[in-house]
Image (tube, rainbow, N blue to C red):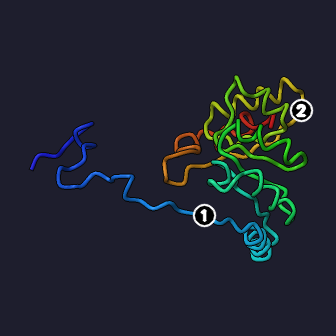
Amino acid sequence: MRRKRGFEALRRPANLAFMDRTRFEPARLTVRLGAVAANYRRFVELCTPARVAGVVKADGYGLGAASVAQTLAHAGCDTFFVARLSEGIALRPLQPVARIFVLDGVYAEDASAFIACRLIPVLNSLPQIEVWSAAARSQKMQLECAIHLDTGMNRLGLAGEERATLSAEREHRLRDL
């Protein structure tokens, strides 16, 4: 049997019926913010002394980042993760004293926005580490960051070769952070 490649592999098999949207009933989602707060407090209880953060990327996974973040903050959460710079910028006025990490990391053209909005990049590559180090040098101050190591999903984070380079050159590459 010949294996399909490229776009040919993406074609829907003829024997599968097209999913007609008119056959679906409307759905309703009830978000219980009290349950979100209770879950956060339970995680804190279970994880102490480790810190617990709220992940509110993708508009709080569709639940509303603003309301979820506010609920978590009232429950004691002071650290949040978002995926993109734009999400961090939108969250900052709603959480003026929180630590806000941006999972996509930082790029040279965005470094000043990170600094102005007090956002913390999660650095995913050696070039991102260099961008943030250069920003720290230009500001003449240490800037907070997190370094993400790829643990096998091959999505974000320093892969094996970059981890080895960082480990061998850590004093040089991390001295300004």
Q: Position of residue 16 (x, y in %)?
A: 23, 55
94 relative to 175, above or below: below
The residue lying toward the viewer, choosing from 80 and 140, is 80
In the image, 29 versus 119, the foreground residue is: 29
Looking at the rendered structure, the kind of residue marked 2 is: Met
Residue at horizontal 77%, vertical 37%? 89
Pick the residue in front: 75 or 100. 75
- Dot 2 falls on a residue whose secondary structure is loop
For label 1, count other residues whose C-alpha is less than 10 Å away and answer few (under 14), some (14-19) or many (20+).
few
Alpha carbon distance from label 1 to label 2:
46 Å
Q: Which mark is residue 141?
A: 2
Q: Position of residue 156 (x, y in %)?
A: 56, 45
Q: Which mark sits nearer the N-terminus, 1 or 2?
A: 1
Q: Position of residue 53 (x, y in %)?
A: 76, 59
Q: Amino acid at mark 1?
A: Leu
Q: Quadrant of residue 69?
A: bottom right
Count of picture labels: 2
- Left or right: 62 with respect to 115? left
